[in-house]
Image: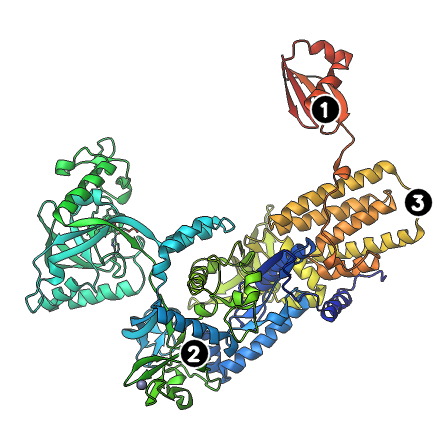
């Protein structure tokens, strides 16, 4: 054994073995319990960053740990290979998105390889592979047959200069990111998936996801946004140009607080509402203000913090209970897609209405009071919005509690035919058409005679041409004659292929099932998915907590209803890892821009608590602003390159540090000294192994029995702790547990040889999932049997955990009276007998009726 730890050598030795024995290929085996551990598939940006290292190490630890516990483990990897960045790169570099993506995948895979992750690469998929997206197309057609997929017009961001549709993130301050042109809203046709049909089920099943973080479950609930309330009508006599009453003379609104109906001081509608359009016809002078509302509404949902604007429409509606006229306002804060696209405003009890009323001087009428308190409404905090008051200023309803009033008012509305109980959802159907090139082609052919014709199943996949280089203007497929011009599958007349592609969220909604049957060309999913699914542990970032997870849950149900799978929830357990952060430093230029410094370019002074207080640049000694700890980002020059760390210290150190740095589910600050500490620990481990091997050779036979017992006790106690940390995925304390184990072994050199060897085996095994290379090589060097990654996970030995005798304090009525030596974990009777056997104690114990025991430490007799 070499006396020096040489990570490069160790790591290539270990990896050569995995490759040669194809160790991580997962094979279905009904006789063994399975464990499917999966990371959210990465976008092949080409650059592996430390965040990836952390995520995949977490995944890897789980997979290796479960394997050693006897599970048949699957840990696959693949690529979310469609999407906008490839098109942007193509514009800059002239390389086609297909080529760019292919190179990036190869690059990223090469950067992952040194990390020693136990992926089964034989199952690798890329979503841009026709063999994969063929099945997304196939399933889309199935959904279309069933009516779960359907077509309707949608509003999109249209760049009039580039003649292209823009994604929301490509619109910056209302202008196209490339052309700078003012973006228009256009209505164009697109395909939708009826996720709303599954809303109730998607919501109620959240309760069963007890392996998910609570905050993600809450985010899912909020996104689905079920609200129970009342739909009610304000009557009106507003007619359209042809003299017809608009909406049969009813303005419908949705409210969750019908008890506040007598507090309504105006009604509000969105600019898209039919009555808004009529108001504009009647008074064209409203146009500029309505347009401003429309633009403000498009800029984003009006949360209570956002500006609310509005204009009186000049129209009135009638209060359903009092018949009084109520002014109708057109505003930006009414969502056209929520509820009825209209609301009854109760400024006294709804904050959004309150802000708006204040701004436009509209009346505020309090109708709910607690303890008869009347509010002065200087600002919102003076008011009361709760449901625990009773009614005032509400005529016949005065004095009723909120619950009673709700019942009574609903009854009155129902009787008049002016209202009913109703449920509204925030969730909208999922628009899946993207007017982009680099995505899964939507398998539809547009025929002049037959309309939209589905591509016959036998003609799938519709292969995306890979020779296009987008230039930022219209979708290049429009000009691609070879792709676009086809014969209509129905009437054979010349027709045009759909050029829209599927939202990349479609690709990521079921890739994890495809890993189970990656090569099947006769079915979307097969026997593999029956064996492996559902995923036992899904791992990914909190940024996907809403859309990706919701879409995948929906898509899985749609597959279930097609008879393809037998389960509804794809992810039994979900782990959301934290981000890696690092300090950032900058100087502000006169134009407000920032010049970012690398941490290596500055010196920092810290206060006594270790907080950075002052920083100067090395190059000129002048001050630099401390930008705080931020997510690692290239633009802020605070990225750590995995390659640099691996080259200097090896992959085991990189893995060890990113795991040790903090709880894996929390954001963690990177520290260079931490990396060096991790490296030193591995060197110490190596040195200790060398020493113990040398000692093994001598087998001196000297053993201090008490010391042996102490070392075994400590090691098994730590093993107990580490095991429970593994179960909770508290991997950072797994590492600190292993560090303590090494200390115990180093300090216990007088223990017997067998005890040291046993301890060493435990230490190598618990560290193996974190640092698989060094532990594997040492395992072999020290002559332990078999391969460490197939050894069985160590269990604490109860014998070792028994402490022979412990000293217990004896109190009587809380006063210390003496102590006894007794077998550890003795029961109450044994403790009483031992205490009574002591002549001094016995004299104090007369009449003792009760005893309180703190195990192994203290007993208190109560007289
Ligand atoms: C009167 C009222 C009084 C309301 C009150 C609330 C409190 P949430 O609260 O999110 O569950 N609303 C209805 N339709 C809307 C639309 N299209 N755009 C914006 N807001 C709309 O949603 C229900 C409440 O949101 C409804 O109850 C309505 O305001 C408002 F003290 O009606 B409420
Ligand atoms: Zn046709």
Tell me the residue that label 3 is attached to.
701
Q: In the depicted view, which residue is nearer to us: 462 or 586? A: 462
- Name the quadrant containing residue 856: top right
Q: Quick one: 177 or 22, which is closer to the camera?
A: 22
Q: Secondary structure at mark 3?
A: loop
Would residue 489 be found to the left or right of residue 609 on screen? left
Kindly check if marks 1 and 3 are in contact, taking CB atoms under 8 A apart as contact: no
- Label 1 sits on a secondary structure element that is strand
- The residues tagged by marks 1 and 3 sit, at their Cα atoms, a distance apart of 35 Å
Q: Quadrant of the N terminus?
A: bottom right
Q: Quadrant of the C terminus?
A: top right
Q: Earlier in the sequence, mark 1 or mark 3?
A: 3
How far apart are the alpha carbons under marks 2 and 1? Answer: 78 Å
| CA separation in Å, label 3 and label 2 | 76 Å
Q: Residues within 10 Å of mark 3 (few under 14, many from 20)?
A: few
Q: Earlier in the sequence, mark 2 or mark 1?
A: 2
**Callout 1: few (<14), some (14-19), or many (20+) C-alpha neighbours within 10 Å?**
many
3 vs 2, front mark: 2
Label 1 sits on residue? 808
């Amino acid at each position: 054994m070499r006396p020096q730890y040489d990570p490069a050598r160790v790591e290539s030795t270990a990896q050569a073995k995995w490759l040669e024995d194809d160790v991580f290929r997962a094979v279905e085996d009904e006789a063994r319990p399975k464990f499917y551990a999966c990371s959210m598939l990465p976008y092949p940006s080409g650059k592996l960053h430390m965040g990836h290292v952390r995520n995949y190490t977490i995944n890897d630890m789980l997979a290796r740990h479960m394997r050693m516990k006897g599970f048949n483990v699957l840990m696959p990897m693949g690529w979310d290979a469609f999407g906008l960045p490839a098109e942007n790169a193509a514009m800059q570099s002239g390389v086609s998105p297909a080529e760019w993506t292919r190179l990036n995948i190869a690059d990223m895979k090469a950067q992952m390889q040194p990390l020693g992750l136990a992926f089964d690469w034989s199952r690798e998929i890329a979503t841009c592979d026709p063999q994969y997206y063929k099945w997304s197309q196939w399933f889309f057609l199935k959904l279309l047959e069933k009516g779960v997929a359907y077509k309707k017009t949608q509003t999109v961001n249209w760049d009039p200069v580039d003649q292209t549709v823009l994604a929301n993130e490509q619109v910056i301050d209302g202008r196209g990111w490339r052309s700078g042109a003012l973006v228009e809203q256009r209505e164009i046709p697109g395909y939708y998936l009826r996720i709303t049909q599954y809303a109730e089920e998607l919501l109620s099943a959240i309760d069963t996801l007890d392996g998910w973080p609570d905050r993600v479950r809450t985010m899912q609930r909020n996104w689905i946004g079920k609200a129970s309330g009342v739909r009610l009508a304000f009557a009106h006599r507003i007619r359209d140009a042809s003299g017809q009453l608009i909406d049969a003379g009813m303005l419908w609104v949705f409210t969750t607080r019908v008890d506040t109906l007598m507090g309504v001081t105006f009604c509000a509608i969105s600019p898209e509402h039919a009555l808004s359009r009529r108001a504009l016809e009647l008074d064209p002078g409203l146009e500029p203000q309505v347009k401003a509302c429309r633009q403000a509404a498009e800029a984003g949902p009006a949360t209570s913090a956002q500006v609310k604007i509005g204009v009186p429409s000049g129209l009135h509606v009638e209060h359903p209970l009092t018949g009084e006229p109520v002014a109708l306002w057109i505003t930006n804060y009414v969502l056209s897609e929520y509820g009825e696209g209209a609301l009854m405003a109760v400024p006294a009890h709804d904050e959004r209405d309150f802000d708006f009323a204040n701004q436009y001087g509209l009346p505020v009428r309090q109708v709910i009071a607690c303890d008869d308190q009347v509010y002065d409404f200087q600002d919102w905090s003076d008011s009361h919005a709760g449901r625990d008051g009773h009614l005032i200023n509400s005529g016949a309803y005065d004095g009723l509690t909120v619950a009673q009033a709700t019942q009574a008012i609903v009854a009155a509305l129902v009787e008049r035919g002016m209202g009913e109980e109703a449920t509204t959802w925030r969730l909208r159907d999922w628009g899946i058409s993207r007017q982009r090139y680099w995505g899964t082609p939507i398998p539809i052919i547009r025929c002049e005679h037959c309309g939209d014709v589905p591509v016959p199943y036998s003609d799938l996949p519709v292969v995306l041409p890979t020779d296009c280089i987008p230039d930022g203007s219209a979708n290049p497929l429009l000009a691609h004659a070879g792709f676009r011009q086809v014969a209509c599958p129905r009437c054979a007349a010349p027709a045009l292929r759909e050029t829209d592609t599927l939202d990349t969220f479609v690709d990521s909604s079921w890739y994890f099932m495809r890993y189970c049957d990656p090569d099947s060309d006769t079915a979307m999913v097969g026997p593999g998915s029956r064996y492996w699914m559902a995923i036992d542990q899904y791992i990914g970032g909190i940024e996907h907590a809403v859309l990706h997870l919701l879409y995948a849950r929906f898509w899985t149900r749609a597959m279930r209803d097609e008879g393809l799978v037998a389960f509804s929830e794809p992810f039994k357990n979900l782990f959301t890892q934290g981000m890696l952060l690092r300090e950032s430093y900058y100087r502000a230029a006169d134009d407000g821009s920032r010049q970012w410094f690398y941490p290596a370019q500055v010196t920092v002074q810290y206060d006594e608590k270790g907080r950075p207080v002052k920083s100067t640049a090395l190059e000129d000694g002048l001050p630099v602003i401390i930008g705080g700890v931020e997510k690692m980002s290239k633009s802020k020059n605070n990225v750590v390159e995995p390659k640099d760390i691996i080259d200097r210290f090896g992959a085991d150190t990189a893995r060890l540090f990113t795991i040790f740095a903090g709880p894996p589910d929390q954001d963690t600050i990177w520290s260079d000294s931490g990396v060096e500490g991790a490296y030193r620990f591995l060197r110490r481990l190596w040195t200790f192994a060398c020493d113990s091997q040398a000692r093994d050779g001598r087998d001196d036979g000297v053993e201090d029995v008490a010391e042996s017992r102490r070392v075994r006790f400590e090691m098994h106690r730590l093993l107990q702790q580490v095991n429970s940390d593994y179960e909770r995925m508290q991997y950072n304390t797994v590492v600190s547990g292993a560090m303590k184990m090494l200390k115990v072994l180093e300090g216990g050199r007088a223990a017997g040889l067998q005890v040291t060897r046993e301890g060493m085996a435990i230490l190598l095994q618990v560290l193996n999932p974190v640092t698989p290379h060094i532990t594997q090589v040492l395992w072999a060097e020290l002559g332990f049997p078999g391969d460490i990654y197939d050894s069985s996970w160590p269990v604490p030995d109860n014998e070792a955990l028994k402490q022979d005798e412990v000293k217990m304090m004896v109190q009587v009525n809380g006063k210390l009276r003496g102590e006894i030596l007794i077998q550890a974990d003795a029961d109450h009777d044994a403790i009483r007998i031992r205490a009574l056997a002591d002549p001094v104690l016995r004299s104090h114990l007369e009449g003792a009726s009760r005893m309180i025991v703190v195990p192994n430490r203290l007993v208190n007799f109560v007289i």
